[in-house]
Image (cartoon, helix red, strand yellow):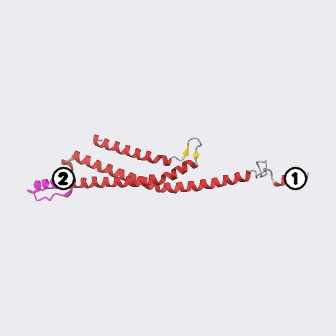
Amino acid sequence: MTEVNEQLMNDYVSYVSDTIKKCKSMGDLIDDIQDAVTPQRLNMALSMYFNISTWLIAEYQRQKICYEIIKREFDLWKDDIFEQAKKQVINEYSETKIKPSVTEFETRARHAHKEEYQTKLAELETAESRMRFLLRMTDLMKSYDSILTTLSSNMRQEMRTLSLDNRMNASPIGVSSNKIRSTEFPSRVRMKEEY
């Protein structure tokens, strides 16, 4: 791997890591102390969803424009060196009756500009990789939306259930007992009353 390619790879890995860090707080739903998804963590993720989603979409569009610019520049540069190579090959074949192929023009152009071609191609591929990574992140956010919605619905149901249990176990106003429900089976209660 050339030094330029290695630098591009390191920049790409750094970019991916930074992007994941920016979105990570929304994905950390499990509270370390309680080892469970807490309402606070879920509410935080729900409240961050819009901001992170719009940031990802904006960043995707920015990287897409960047990719398009690099691609256009690469194509123009490639056209120039292709034309130069084509003229050179045609001049070399002018004495013979052999017609050179397009592949030969392309190969000659790449060979004449090896290092520059590799550098420009690596830049183009890195820009495309960033764009595709962000596209996958936005797809992930779409599926994460349904996960958050399901967790929220489940948590509301659990809280309603807990709230009902608390109300059933609460003492009515003016009564000192904390428990209203009997913990014994109804048949045993009747038997004690009869004796």
In the rendered image, the residue lying farthest to the left is 95
Residue 17, label in figure: none
- Residue 138 lies within the magenta run: no
Q: Which residue position is annotated with label 2?
A: 81
Choose mark 1 or mark 2, whichever is in front. 1
Residue drawn at (22%, 46%), measured in percent from left and top? Answer: 114
The local secondary structure at tag 1 comes to helix
- The reply, left or right, for residue 122 in relation to residue 149 is left
Marks counted in the figure total 2
| Residue stretch rendered in magenta on the structure | 82-102
The answer to whether residue 25 is visible is: yes
**Rendering coords of residue 4 (x, y %):** 28, 42
**Rendering coords of residue 36 (x, y %):** 58, 46
- Upstream in the sequence, badge 1 or badge 2? 2
Q: Which residue position is annotated with label 1?
A: 191
| Mark 2 residue type | Ile
| Mark 1 residue type | Met
Most frequent secondary structure within the magenta stretch: helix
Of residue 95 and residue 179, the one placed in the foreground of this image is 179
